[in-house]
Amino acid sequence: MEIFRYKSDAWGQRVLEGASWDLLWFFVGAALVFIVLHAIYKRRLLKGSADDE
Amino acid sequence: MSEPAAHYDVGTRVVRHRLADRLYHWLMAAAMLVLLGTGFLPILGLRFAWVDAHWIAGVILIALVLFHIFRALFVLRYADMWVGWREFRQSFAATTKEVLGGRSARRRFGKYSVGQKMFHHAVAIVVLTACVTGVIMMVGVDSPFWDRNPLFITEKTRGVVFLLHGLAGLFSITMIIVHVYFAIRPEKRYMTRSMIRGWISRREYEVHHDPKLWGVDE
């Protein structure tokens, strides 16, 4: 997965163009991973509380 | 001019978000969705004239951010959004303990939890980066404000500006998804309601919030 996008300038030199759009799915995936981990954490927490009662 | 901590409404409701702040939040959300849609849908292959819609939404976002900065400086209370080192350490230690399977005493917080405050600050960094870089990029586009000037910045600087703008957009996607997830979680719905209707119940206030950290005027 590329992190940067490059292009050639008027003199043919390779210059930075911006962030690679391959990263789009990484950022969507990071959000989904966070949600899954948080949901597991909260579920465990709630289960722990129920077991105590 | 700073607003009082909070207001009871007939003894049963506590005002958490005033109308101006709720309008700011939802208009910002709409502007962000337009910006992300016009910014990323063309990349995903949906072809349409996105440039004008993108910069117009950007200008609206900048106006909203300036409005919010004004309210933050002169109307809202810094203390509600300030993350103290001790508060951060306590919250971090308690969460770490819970993640590792331990138990910690349930914590009441002020107007916002540490997590919410950290999220706000992350959004502030990302949105301000997007706004500043967006204005620089806009110089290269014809608009009612000026005629385009593609030579305003060097090619190298343009690359850095585009990189920062792109990263701000990408981080925004992650943060919006996570934000919506928290907004619909059962234990957070009372906060989501407060962002729609403005208030939380007195019971919600007493259960979740520490009066020492977020006092109310009765």
Image (cartoon, rainbow, N blue to C red):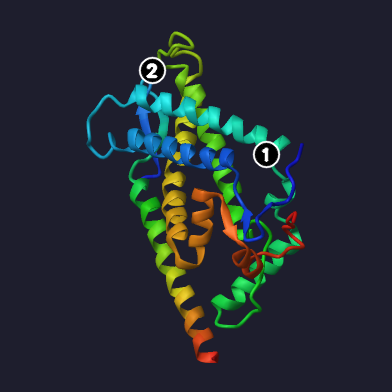
Query: On the same chain: label 1 and label 2?
Result: no
Q: Amino acid at mark 2?
A: Trp
Q: Quadrant of residue B70?
A: top right
Q: Which mark is residue B72?
A: 1
| Residue drawn at (48%, 25%) of the image | B59
Residue A7 visible, this angle? yes
Left or right side of A45 for A19: left
- Dot 1 crowding, Cα within 10 Å, few <14, some 14–19, many 20+: some
Q: Quadrant of residue B39?
A: top left
> Which one is in front, B58 or B16?
B16
Q: Which residue is mark 2?
A: A11
Q: Where does residue B48 sit, x and y in percent of width and height?
A: 24, 28
Q: Amino acid at mark 1?
A: Ala
Residue B132 visible, this angle? no
Q: Does residue B6 sit above or below B168 in this rendering? A: below
Label 1 vs label 2, nearer the camera: 1
